[in-house]
Image: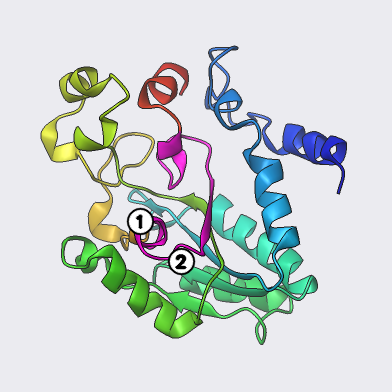
Amino acid sequence: MSDDLLARIRAIIQEDVGNRGLRTDPDDNLITACADDFAAACKHLAHHPQPAVGIVTGFYIPAERCGETDGPLGAVFLARALAALGIKTWLLVDAFVAPALEAGIGIAGLRKTVPVVTLPSAAAFETLSPEIYWDEVSARTGPLTHLVAIERAGPSHTPESLEGQGTRRAYEEAVPGEHHDRYHTMRGIDITPHMSPAHLLFEAAARKQAGVTTIGIGDGGNEIGMGKIAWEVIKRNV
């Protein structure tokens, strides 16, 4: 696939249709921060000799007591594309979104080829290490080469995670301590008790599973993968 075609696809999928403010600062924003990542992710998947992909999705909406819809739909579409290419794929989700994913893969004709794996419960947030969490999930998937988070809630920063960014003091002044390292909605509601700590998979991949490539897709700054973008950039734009 040519670089020009990849750039055109990227331009389409990065349209800010929800007016989140992804490009509020025209020079330094959520799009410019990761300009080359889309092409790199596509090429890495395409060139891997035997890819095995775990797609993680799910974002709890407390007012509705269910999951939001964009992540699961995106996960099904991606799984359908990967399956058509002969790539082994698993959908890794919380129990509250598993029925929607099961319905989606059924309609897509993927029920026999794309398993839906329910992640460990939210109660595991403070009890499982990244390595143990990884082992629990991989026991049901087998070896993975890629982890893709699609609109999957990730924990907020801690002062320690901001070391080197020069924004630790500003963060501590803006964010109360009880909201550090917690999952939040765009409205700042803490949804940690409802979410399996799937970010531990990505931490384990970075710390232990050297052969696993991680890819994050999000549109608000509070999803897994958005920690790659400086906190001040997200704060200024979204």
Going from the N terminus, do you reach mark 2 or mark 1 first? 2
Residue 180 locus on image (x, y percent): 20, 39
Does residue 32 sit above or below 192 in this rendering?
Answer: above
Q: Is residue 227 magenta?
A: yes
Q: Is any atom of residue 175 visible in this view?
A: yes
Does residue 229 sit above or below 83 in this rendering?
Answer: above
Decide if residue 225 is on the left or right side of residue 77.
left
Q: What residue sits 44% from the left and 35% below the top?
A: 221
Number of other residues with Cα within 10 Å of mark 2, as a class: few under 14, some 14 to 19, many 20 or more: many
Number of other residues with Cα within 10 Å of mark 1, as a class: few under 14, some 14 to 19, many 20 or more: some
Does residue 105 sit above or below 158 in this rendering?
Answer: below
* Nearer the observer, 232 or 214: 214
* Nearer the observer, 119 or 5: 5
Res. 5 mark: none
Find the distance from the CA under tag 2 to the CA under tag 1: 23 Å
Residue 230 locus on image (x, y percent): 41, 27
Q: What residue sits 48% from the left and 69% below the top?
A: 92
Q: Is any atom of residue 69 visible in this view?
A: no
Q: Is residue 130 magenta?
A: no
Secondary structure beneath dot 1 equals helix
Secondary structure beneath dot 2 equals loop
Does residue 235 sit above or below 121 in this rendering?
Answer: above
Looking at the image, the residue that sits furthest to the front is 210
| Quarter occupied by residue 187 | top left
Q: Please name the amino acid that badge 2 sits on.
A: Val
Q: What span is colored magenta in the figure?
A: 201-228
Res. 203 mark: 1
| Quarter occupied by residue 75 | bottom right
Q: Which residue is mark 2?
A: 97
